[in-house]
């Protein structure tokens, strides 16, 4: 309720698109005149009651979209001709200076990328935005994912054009089957020739591929998550909407299928399938837009090629540096390891989601086992990333505050401050959202982000795959879903013991076990709960309910096999929908489950009691049984399930404090 009431905070700066206060980032170039002028300006601003503001940044449509960089700070009555600025006009074009405009260009940063801890910080910030979109109760993508400038459609298309991504040669694409370690020779010949270039040019190209793969990767993961949530038809689906502005791109809402409309039957088709029009749209450039999950570059096939190419570049560059014996290997190797780990965990997480969202009755068990491996691999990679020295340094200070503002980083790294301030802006889309109340996005510290993503990846294993693989009876499936809805996010990275003199909160650890599963895991359970006219794609619903009736109430098979109008066969068909709803209710949010039980399930089972009495009466008449000595089998089964629903309903009310 407190989170919902934040919509009434109309005085919040985020609610007014024209009132964004100016915050000058650290890293102003050291110059006596400029430092003196900037200090006078700061003193005048502090003494003045009027605050300097600027309009929201316009979403970029390309890398070069923006205004030039300069060293002056905007003031209320700033003039373009200031004597302290003449010395800066003679600097090289590649010099990174303080952006004074709210629309800095990304092109200078693209031209100055290096395999350095700054790039690791940028990719970690992208994971932070992705986690805020997924794990923050379905925050709007415009205020989480698309706060990253590199994730906008036009920027991604520009990076793809500059890198000349080739998707015509698919012979070496793993498509989720071949292990990532076997893709070292994935680079095409023309890109392998670039390894013979000088070290600076090679490092620049490797860094560009890494940034492009990570930027497009988080967009594809967010798109896959939104597709699952929307198609599961859950109550949170409206929270995962993305503001569609700035173009006519179309997002495929029909899933990925073969050209003849048949379901996918191989892992290569499931993970590596791309629409027939993707290549044509890519060649044409598509329709540039701001926030549409980049439809011009859509398709899992395309994404796998980008990931494999970037990973191959990183591995070959590391081998080249080791062979040449570079002097800065102590800093370079941890940086490459962190970048490679980030790309690999993105790839594994994406593959797990795509596999679980495209199951069919022929491949459900085999594909689910592969999804288990992918989710476990994601958890292990996140643990490896936590242990990386560069990421550990980021965890001490953090990158972004809870309100979305960038935190001041090290003052001796001005280029890092400039890179992050140009790459991330929580206000970039405020002019598109208007003054309507919106949910505040919550950005976490890097250590908390990795822990949260690890819990989410682990949920795919024990929360989604286990019921599919081991739920072979209706009672067992019910117990597994009940346990999952009541348990915390177990099976993820084990909580470490905090150091002496520091609390668990300071170490970035969870002090309490979170309850319930993420909306992504619950939606995947709903998508796979009943498809191809079978429960989990494996069991006939009427057969498994009949088996459950025999186990719980010793219902005779004669009752279940009766073909009369009010007999057992028609009764099992009638039970299918209410019993399916009991399983679906266990996948709802705890608050919504109680309301769903009260408004839908209990009234439905009240009607079933009258129908069950008719079934029992018909059974006794058919076989000439004495009503006084013959149990009411169907009625007892309905009452048993009604009591279970009532008990859980009361228990949820007590737990929720109602």
Image: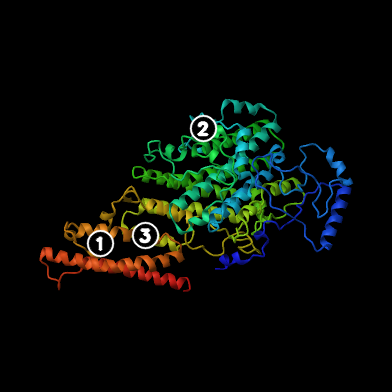
Residue drawn at point x = 51 percent, y = 32 percent? 280
Task: Give coordinates of residue 101: x percent, y percent.
Answer: 75, 48
Which of these two is toward me, 40 or 355? 40
Spatial distance from mark 2 to mark 3, Cα to Cα? 43 Å
Q: Position of residue 355 (x, y in %)?
A: 44, 44
**Which residue shows up at 59% across the image and 64% down it?**
7
Give the residue at mark 1. 549
For label 2, the residue is 280
**Where does residue 31 sit, x and y in percent of width and height?**
86, 47
Looking at the image, tell me whether mark 2 or mark 3 is earlier in sequence order: 2
Query: Does any portion of residue 547 appear in the rendered image?
Result: no
The location of residue 314, given as percent across then percent down, is 61, 36
Asked where in the image residue 479 lies, by quadrant, the reply is bottom left
Q: Residues within 10 Å of mark 2 (few under 14, many from 20)?
A: few
Residue bearing the label numbered 3:
583
Query: Secondary structure beneath disc 1?
Result: helix
Towards the viewer: 305 or 275:
275
Q: Is residue 111 left or right of residue 505?
A: right
> Is residue 447 something that shows in the picture?
yes
Q: Are marks 2 and 3 in contact (CB under 8 Å)?
A: no
């Amino acid at each position: 309720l407190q989170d919902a009431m934040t919509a009434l905070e109309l005085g919040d700066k985020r609610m007014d698109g024209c009132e964004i206060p100016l915050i000058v980032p650290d890293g102003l170039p050291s110059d006596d005149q400029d430092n003196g002028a900037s200090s006078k300006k700061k003193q005048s601003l502090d003494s003045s009651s009027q605050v300097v503001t600027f309009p929201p940044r316009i979403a970029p449509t390309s890398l070069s979209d923006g205004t030039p960089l300069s060293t002056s700070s905007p003031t209320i009555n700033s003039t373009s001709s200031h004597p302290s600025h003449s010395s800066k006009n003679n600097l090289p074009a590649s010099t990174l200076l303080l952006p004074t405009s709210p629309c800095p260009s990304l092109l200078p940063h693209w031209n100055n990328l290096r395999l350095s801890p700054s790039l690791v910080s940028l990719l970690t910030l992208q994971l932070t935005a992705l986690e805020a979109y997924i794990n923050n109760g379905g925050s709007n993508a415009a205020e989480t994912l698309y706060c990253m400038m590199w994730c906008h459609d036009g920027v991604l298309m520009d990076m793809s054009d500059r890198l000349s991504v080739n998707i015509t040669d698919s012979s070496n694409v793993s498509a989720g089957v071949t292990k990532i370690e076997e893709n070292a020779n994935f680079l095409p010949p023309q890109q392998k020739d670039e390894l013979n270039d000088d070290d600076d040019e090679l490092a620049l190209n490797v860094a560009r591929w890494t940034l492009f793969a990570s930027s497009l990767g988080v967009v594809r993961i967010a798109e896959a998550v939104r597709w699952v949530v929307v198609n599961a038809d859950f109550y949170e689906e409206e929270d995962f909407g993305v503001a569609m502005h700035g173009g006519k791109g179309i997002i495929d809402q029909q899933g990925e299928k073969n050209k003849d409309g048949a379901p996918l039957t191989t892992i290569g088709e499931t993970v590596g399938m791309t629409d027939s029009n993707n290549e044509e749209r890519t060649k044409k450039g598509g329709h540039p837009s701001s926030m549409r999950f980049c439809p011009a570059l859509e398709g899992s096939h395309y994404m796998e090629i980008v990931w494999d190419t970037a990973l191959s570049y990183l591995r070959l560059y590391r081998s080249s540096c080791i062979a040449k014996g570079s002097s800065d290997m102590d800093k370079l190797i941890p940086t490459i390891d962190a970048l490679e780990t980030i790309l690999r965990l993105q790839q594994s997480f994406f593959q797990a989601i795509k596999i679980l969202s495209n199951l069919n009755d022929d491949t459900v068990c085999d594909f689910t086992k592969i999804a288990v491996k992918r989710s476990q691999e994601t958890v292990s990679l996140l643990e490896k990333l936590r242990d990386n020295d560069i990421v550990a340094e980021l965890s001490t200070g953090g990158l972004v505050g809870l309100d979305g503002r960038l935190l001041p980083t090290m003052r001796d790294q001005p280029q890092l401050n400039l890179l992050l301030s140009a790459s991330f802006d929580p206000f970039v889309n405020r002019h598109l959202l208007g003054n309507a109340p919106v949910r505040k996005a919550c950005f976490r510290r890097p250590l908390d982000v990795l822990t949260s993503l690890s819990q989410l990846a682990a949920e795919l294993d024990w929360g989604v795959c286990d019921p599919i693989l081991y739920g072979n009876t209706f009672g067992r499936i019910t117990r597994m879903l009940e346990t999952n809805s009541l348990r915390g996010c177990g099976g993820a990275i084990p909580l470490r013991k905090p150091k002496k003199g520091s609390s668990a909160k300071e170490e970035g650890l969870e002090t309490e076990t979170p309850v319930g599963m993420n909306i992504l895991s619950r939606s995947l359970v709903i998508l796979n709960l009943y498809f191809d006219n079978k429960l989990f794609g494996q069991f006939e619903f009427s057969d498994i309910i009949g088996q459950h009736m025999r186990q719980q109430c010793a219902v005779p098979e004669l009752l279940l096999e009766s073909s009369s109008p009010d007999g057992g066969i028609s009764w099992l068909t009638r039970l299918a929908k209410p019993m399916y709803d009991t399983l679906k209710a266990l996948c709802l949010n705890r608050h919504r489950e109680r309301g769903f039980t009260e408004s839908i399930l209990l009234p439905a089972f009240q009607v079933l009691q009258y129908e069950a009495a008719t079934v029992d009466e018909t059974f006794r008449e058919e076989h000439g049984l004495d009503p006084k000595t013959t149990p009411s089998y169907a009625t007892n089964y309905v009452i048993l399930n009604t009591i279970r629903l009532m008990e859980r309903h009361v228990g949820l009310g007590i737990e929720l404090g109602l």
